[in-house]
Amino acid sequence: MKTLVIYFSQKGKTKEAAGRIAQLSGADLAEIKTYKSYRMSYRKTVFTALKEILLNERPELDMEIPDISAYDRILIGSPIWCGTIPNAVFSFLDKVNLNGKKAAIFTTSGATEPQKIAVKIKKKYSAKWCRPFNANHATDENITDWLK
């Protein structure tokens, strides 16, 4: 099964988790990048995330969108901001067609479980959604179990 791990990371935690997941699954790895920088303080990140959520803003992507037709499984990594994934991830999801793909979300939050996020995403984006995963402090064994 050909797999793509694609992630958005502000400070590197999700990037690290995505790298481990890609390595353990033999997947290709890609980063969701935006023109807008999110390298900011916690307080400013919360303010920015709330504004984007309330206004339903979709940050413009600064990346070549991977051709996901070449993949059977798409694993999407994200932090959780204000109880949801950042709108940068939604910008990516809006641009791809997940129809017929197996897809799953993995997050790196210490507070919010990814199941709550997955419920919202499943309603909006068609795919065969698999069990979400909290990769925060996950061991290689946890990751391998999830990938099955």
Image: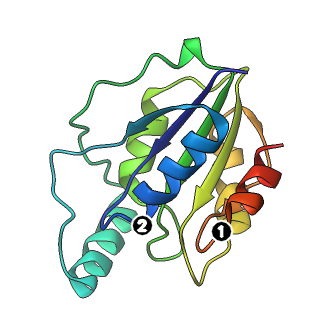
Residue 28 position (above or below residue 67): below
Rendered view: 56 above or below 75: below
Q: Say which residue appears at 18% left-offset and 67% top-offset.
A: 39
In this figure, which residue is indicated by the disc labeled 1?
A: 138
Q: CA distance from mark 2 to mark 1?
A: 12 Å
Residue 24: percent from left, percent from top:
64, 43
Residue 86, image x, y percentages: 41, 60
Label 1 environment density (alpha carbons within 10 Å; few <14, some 14–19, many ≥20):
some
Residue 12 in the image: above or below residue 48: above
Q: Position of residue 23 (x, y in %)?
A: 56, 41
Which residue is pictured at 71% across the width and 46% down the height?
122
Percent position (x, y) of residue 123?
70, 46
Q: Residues within 10 Å of mark 2 (few under 14, many from 20)?
A: some
Residue 115 position by quadrant? bottom right
Residue at label 2?
13
Label 1 is placed on what type of residue? Answer: Ala
Q: Which three-letter amino acid code belongs to the residue tagged 2?
A: Lys
**Who's the residue at 16% across and 53% down the image?**
36
Q: Secondary structure at mark 2?
A: helix
Contact check, label 2 and label 1, Cβ < 8 Å: no
> Which quadrant: the C terminus?
top right
View extreme (top): residue = 70
Quadrant for residue 1, please give it.
top right
